[in-house]
Amino acid sequence: MAALAAAPTQPTETGAPAMTLVTPAAADTAAAAPTPSRMLTGDRPTGRLHLGHYFGTLHNRVRLQDAGVETFLIIADYQVLTDRDVAEHLAEHVEDLVLDYLAAGIDPARTTVFTHSAVPALNQLLLPFLSLVSVAELQRNPTVKDEIAHSRQSTVSGLMFTYPAHQAADILFCKADVVPVGQDQLPHLEVTRTIARRFNDRYGRVFPEPEALLSAAPLVLGTDGTKMSKSRGNAIALSATADETAKLIRRATTDADRTITYDPDRRPGVSGLLLLAAHCLGRAPEDIAAEIGDAGAARLKALVTEVVNEHFAPLRARRADLARDRAYLHGILREGNARANEIADRTLREVRTAMGMDYGV
Ligand code: ATP
Ligand code: MG
């Protein structure tokens, strides 16, 4: 399969990929790509999904699902522990993710939603996969470096270092060939591809080499002008109320220059806000900036608040409806976990056979 997106490679001070803001005017990389057959992607249950998730990957997930691609969404609960001692409020965060998915258009009849900890055979793939990467490769992974830089822990756990190999297990257990992700995940995906290639070379072909799928918004900025993240206090949740949204945007970082211009390198705060409006309106951020001109940051913030609230009102209403039926959410997870287990058991059997470990199976 042809590459679906180019990976930006300039390193930042943390070694993470340089920020590349792609505007809605830029072609969405999904559009021209050949149709893949199986998609896997997911989220850590560390809080509610935000606008970065929506424009960064969720929208693409729904689009591929609707185009007939078999879809898997993993709720990566073990991976919460990569950067903190204790995974708090897990059950609540897991329910929140399922609600966010459904409200955004994920259909459980066509998409398998499951939690990573409920699929033992998936986690067992980590062991052979770890044998296929060197410690040095894990140490220089830019995503790992960036996540360590933002970690809540004073030391780095083994789970943090093995995160990319674990993610390879998440993706390869179901033999996904496409993974819609934000830009921060590209180095992890490269590890998955390397592991798939090395496994196939060493033991015979079992796995596809999955492609990353970047959307037109691979790096949505938060209210402080850095990557919008659940864990960094800079996010606007999909489920925020109109008032909460207004308050968060009012507090967003801008700068002293009254004239609004789109300049991501020098003005990340203003440019991040312009991009939010641009993604909601499907317009170029430069045009929105030109319209605001000398009216300043207050006008920009009022516009962003208005368009975000308008764009997400239907999703928020659906989410509120769905939240009334928790039993339905649990049923989706039960069925998703059962299906993920069937597939993971099958893949693990294949892996053991390929590795000559099929005695007693
Ligand atoms: P945390 O702060 O807990 O790491 P997060 O906001 O980074 O949370 P993840 O669960 O780590 O969210 O990421 C889930 C998916 O969403 C990944 O594919 C990631 O690349 C994508 N994503 C996260 N934040 C953004 C963003 N600001 N812009 C575009 N994509 C994003
Ligand atoms: Mg993250």
Image (spheres, helix red, strand yellow):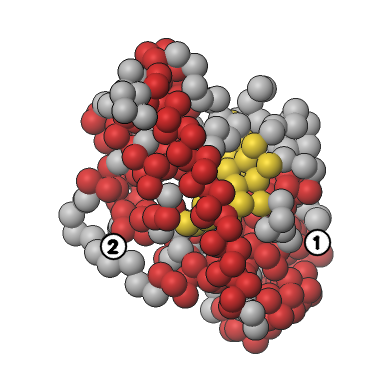
Residue at 45% in and 13% down:
204
- Disc 1 on helix, strand or loop? helix
Circle 2: residue type: Arg
Q: Left or right: where does residue 292 sit relative to residue 333?
A: right
Above or below 96: residue 38: above
User: Considering depth in this image, is 213 or 350 the residue closer to the camera?
Assistant: 350
Residue at 58% in and 40% down:
179
Residue 247 position, x and y percent, is: 59, 83
Going from N to C along the chain, the mark reached first, 1 or 2, is 2
Residue at 47% in and 70% down:
93
Circle 1: residue type: Leu
Q: Left or right: where does residue 91 sit relative to residue 328?
A: left
Image quadrant assignment for residue 153: bottom left
How far apart, in angstroms, are the residues tagged by discs 1 and 2?
37 Å
User: Residue 281, which numbered label?
Assistant: 1
Tell me the quarter of the image containing the C terminus. Answer: top left
User: Considering depth in this image, is 294 or 169 the residue closer to the camera?
Assistant: 169
Image quadrant assignment for residue 295: bottom right
Tell me the quarter of the image containing the N terminus. Answer: top right
Residue 315 position, x and y percent, is: 73, 71
Residue at 60% in and 63% down:
332
Tell me whether the residue at label 1 lies in contact with that at label 2, contact meaning CB atoms closer than 8 angstroms.
no
| Mark in front: 1 vs 2 | 2
User: Considering depth in this image, is 254 or 190 the residue closer to the camera?
Assistant: 190
- From this viewpoint, which residue is outermost toward the front? 360
Q: Which residue is mark 2?
A: 84
